[in-house]
Amino acid sequence: MARSDFSERCFFILTAAALVQCLCAASVEAAENAPPDAVKNVIAQQCAACHGPDEQKAGIRLDDLQFQLDAEPVFHTWQRVHDAIASGKMPPKDAAEESLRGERDAAVQVLHDSLHQASLQRQNEQGRVRLRRLNTTEYETTLHDLLGTNVPLRELLPEDTPSAGFDNVSSALDLSATHFLKYQEAAATAIASVVPVGPPVDFSDMRTGKDMTLKGPNFREGLGRNSVLKGDSLIIYSKLPRYGLCATAAVPQTGRYRIRMKAAAVGADGKSIPVGLMRVMQSGRESPVLYDVVDIPHGEPQEIEFECDLVSRQQFVVNLLTTWDIRRFKRPIEEYTGPGLLVDWMKIEGPIGEFPSKSYEALFRGIPLKARSVVRAEQAGRRVPEINPQRTAQQWEADPLVPVSANPREDLDRLIRDFLPRAFRRPVSDEEARLYVDAAIAKLEQGSSFYDAATFGYQFVLSSPSFLFLLDSPPGKPLDTYSLASRLSYFLWSSSPDEELLARAADGTLSEPAVLRSQVDRLLASSKAHRFTKNFVGQWLDLRKIDATIPDPVLYSDFDPLLLWSMPRETELFFEEVLRDDLSVLNFVHSDWSMLNERLSIHYGVPGPQGSRFEKVQLPAESHRGGVMTQASVLKVTADGTRTSPVLRGVWVLNRMLGTPPSPPPPDVPPIEPDIRGATTIRQQLDRHRNTPACASCHNEIDPPGFALESYDPIGNYRTFYRVTTRTPAGPVDLPYGSGRPVYRGPDVELGGQTPDGRPFSGIDEYKTLILNDKDQIIRNLVQKMTIYSTGSDIQFADREVIEQIVERLKNGNSGLRSLIHEVVQSRMFLNK
């Protein structure tokens, strides 16, 4: 045999052997990664027809899907399979033979155990929560607390992307070069805000009501429409436009000011009147920003005092929050006897407070301040200019104060070392501190001033990973006490731990259940806990979108700024009442009480308190109110300002209240525009939509809660008919509150519906009763939401076991909201990395 033939044969033999070995290995691997028999049998018998070689509905093929649960995409596909079979949604009812129920149950159990073990192993190896950076809100509040400043910073930072319903979930909090640049810019802004431009320059200005009409641009054009002069007093009957305001003079310096005004409510009804306290820049290019509401008593004018933080060239404003159409009153405005605000005079004085401020001491403790011109003269060896003690605020702006050190290296070392543990929320080693100190000193040695070098050093700290990220313990381990302190404080305060919490971290007692529980209660008792309400409720219930739509001013003339201000406060105060008294979380679905002021009481048509302040009010049984779904804030954010959508509201209820969000449309199904010609009501339109096969399955879930809430208009009025602007035989609708623009009765609202399992309801009251039959799911949903928000991570399969244990304990107790928070904080989901 020729050598070449022999070589070829050897090559083919070896190649064949290697191929056989590879095929055998692949066969072994495929066998090892095949689904367990119990799962494989159910797939083959009941799933392969729709998810097999011939058809892959929703783009999913199961007959050849490997069981490699360490691969995330594969894991999530099997998790979807588990959830679909466990919930009874798959296989479809017409294909789900009852005789095979036992096999499905066995497959679900096998899937559950396998998925749980794989998820738990991933948590032990990688940690449950990824490395998480501070979101925009947390960065701002942390700097505010750390430096004692209130300068706005959020607008300087990139917007965060929400995930799983919240903007603090680590998987969505990316970090780019742009982020670092913006963090440095925001840090520089915050640092500069604590350094005073100059010492307080006494400022005082007093204006009568008449003076305001003369000094406000174009104000006199407003007289005769919604305001009138009475001697030197100004009487306002409706919200004033931004070009003519009841305002103080613009202040020359940033600081805190004292405002006194002599004013009274007027009107034949003898009632107090709510007034908005606002700030506006002197330029007048922007509308005033409302920051509080107070009630001005009726009767003889009284002196009333406020304190307000203002920036240079900003004015303090009082304004009404109600709108009134002058066309309703046909006689001279002087004869009007309706409610109004009489202002005799307004006086502003300031700035008040310490100098230098505590915020300055937070960064520059013990460092004197000098005028910049003096510093430059001293550095150049020139004659030092004299500073006129009677300098004006404008002169100080031209030649501001700057921190100056006689021993800059030593002071930089001292200040930065003192700042680092507070900024990093933990002890800092000498080696670590030296990195930041050396950076600031290097800047000094390059010729920068002490102030610039200090600013550079602080910027370095405030854009470093140890500040930007919540650094945790190793994966699979309990959090160390400092990491636990940070997780707890960012959960309940959206900010860094205070001295007390860091002290418990330092002595190691924070991880003790009793100490941890007491710290939760302490943090919730603080005024900072309102941030928890704003940030958690604002995202859970979408209250952050309260200003996203403007109701049609003709259809909804009963909407005004006072109602808008009141809407989210009802929901926030409701949440805080449930939290404070550890009331059942089922109150969020239905309650026989709410937190109302006079404006909301009128809006809801129920007896309530007088004035703008909120009180706990018992709701009449026939009010169709109770819980958060029927609160005006929720009803506004789930509408577009003109129309309501059962689909939008239905999806909101499924996601926010029930924790059963509908599936997105399958990727292989294009958007469908069903023929709705001839449909005259929203229900008829949706009936035609749901008769389209590709839409029906989801709309069976979405439409019922949407129809239950169709009895409420876009601003939260309960209604039995739709408003229209076209005149109808029934004539105009009599509104209990509004500007008087006529609206008319349109088609009746069609009430009622039925749940996906066929249970009928006639309206929202019966619908709430039906969903309260599954109390476990209501509790489970809120436990899940709280876990996501508190830990910054979405729910994972291994978490389900812990969540069910929490649900069971809460159900056997009072299912209280405070108890729920304690349960989440004491769970391994919160305590572990």
Image: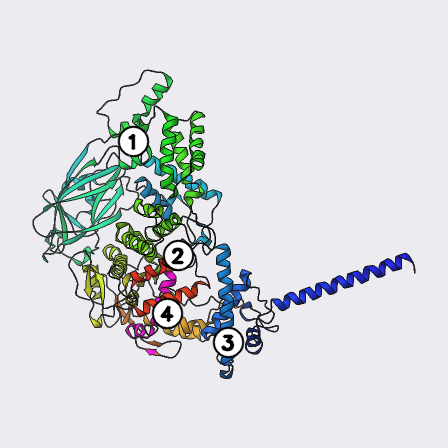
Tell me the SS state at disc 3.
helix
Under mark 4, the amino acid is Gln
Under mark 2, the amino acid is Phe
Tell me the SS state at disc 4.
helix
Residue 778 in view in this figure: no
Q: Is residue 214 above or below residue 602?
A: above
Give the number of the disc on residue 197.
1
Which tag, 3 or 1, sits closer to the chain's start?
A: 3
- Magenta-drawn stretch contains 783: yes
Q: Is residue 326 left or right of residue 164?
A: left
Q: Nearer the viewer, mark 4 or mark 1?
A: 4
Which residue matches tag 4? 777
Which residue matches tag 3? 106
State the separation of the CA atoms marked 2 and 4: 21 Å
State the separation of the CA atoms marked 1 and 2: 45 Å
The answer to whether the residues at label 3 and label 1 have Cβ atoms under 8 Å apart is no
Magenta region, residue range: 760-785
State the residue lying farthest toward the bottom.
Answer: 99
Which image quadrant: the C terminus? bottom left
Which residue matches tag 2? 830
Which tag, 2 or 4, sits closer to the chain's start?
A: 4
Tell me the SS state at disc 2.
helix
- Magenta-drawn stretch contains 806: no
Of the pair 182 and 684, the residue shown nearer to us: 182
Q: Nearer the viewer, mark 3 or mark 1?
A: 3
> Could you say where residue 341 lies in the image, as x and y percent from the top left?
14, 50
Under mark 3, the amino acid is Ala
